[in-house]
Image: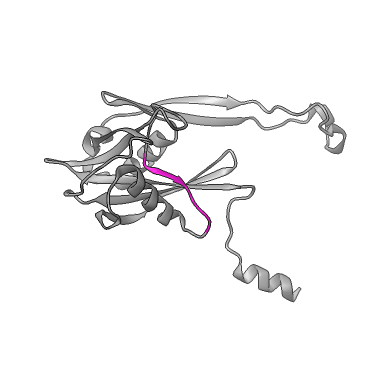
């Protein structure tokens, strides 16, 4: 029992069955007249080409999610680390075996952007005020459970008639002149706007 107590006293809980960790930055930048959220359009040379996203990527061994978000932002946008001031973290997402940590930060107005063309096709800003007044389009999808043929139904009460719960997911879309903001990027955007941008109502 002593070893169990010691192990639990030092253990930091995390989502079960998560094998990968990612982190993104929600970059806030003051334009000529108003604050904007910076987005990037992904290059054709990487996964999910043409999609709009926040800068970010996988958390490498030995670094924290915040360090990963800052590192990836510097690499993708071509800015210096001292151009970034972290304001804090917001609720994270857990899905499909990975966790995604979003951090909100201010990017210095005089930062010089040199986007990495291997990863970023375009960098653009959208005013917080215009996003705040725009209601996202919301669509619900149901995820059907697909069991393998050799699944041991005889192990569980009810066997093949067991009433499995059906997963239901929400997908948000922000149709914009600059492009379509959707998926997890839209979900993080909406969460940030609803919980931290009251002054723009």
The quadrant holding residue 81 is bottom left
Residue 57 is covered by the magenta coloring? yes
Q: Residue at x 27, y 33 (%)?
A: 131
Q: Observer-nearest residue: 112 or 198? A: 112
Position in image of residue 88 (x %, y %): 35, 55
Q: Residue at x 53, y 31 (%)?
A: 169
Taking the image as shown, residue 171 lies to the left or right of residue 176, namely right
Q: Observer-nearest residue: 1 or 29? A: 29
Position in image of residue 45 (x %, y %): 42, 30
Q: Observer-nearest residue: 23 or 34? A: 23
The quadrant holding residue 123 is top left
Magenta stretch secondary structure, dominant: loop
Q: Looking at the picture, does residue 87 appear above or below residue 123? A: below
Residue 110 is covered by the magenta coloring? no
* Segment colored magenta: 54-61
- Whether residue 89 is visible here, answered yes or no, is no
């Amino acid at each position: 029992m002593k070893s169990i107590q010691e192990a639990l006293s030092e253990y930091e809980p995390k989502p079960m069955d998560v094998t990968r960790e990612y982190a993104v930055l929600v970059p806030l930048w003051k334009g000529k007249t108003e604050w904007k959220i910076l987005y990037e359009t992904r290059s054709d040379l990487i996964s999910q080409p043409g999609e709009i996203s926040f800068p970010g990527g996988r958390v490498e061994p030995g670094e924290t999610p915040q360090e990963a978000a800052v590192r990836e932002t510097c690499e993708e946008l071509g800015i210096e680390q001292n151009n970034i001031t972290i304001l804090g973290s917001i609720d994270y997402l857990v899905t499909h075996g990975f966790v995604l940590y979003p951090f909100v930060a201010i990017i210095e107005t005089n930062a010089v952007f040199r986007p990495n063309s291997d990863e970023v096709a375009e960098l653009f800003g959208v005013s917080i005020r215009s996003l705040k007044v725009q209601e996202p389009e919301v669509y619900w999808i149901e995820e059907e459970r697909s069991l393998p043929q050799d699944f041991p139904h005889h192990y569980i009460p009810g066997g093949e008639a067991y009433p499995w719960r059906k997963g239901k997911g929400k997908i948000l879309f922000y149709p914009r002149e600059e492009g379509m903001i959707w998926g997890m990027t839209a979900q993080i955007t909406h969460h940030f706007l609803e919980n931290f941008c009251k002054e723009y109502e």
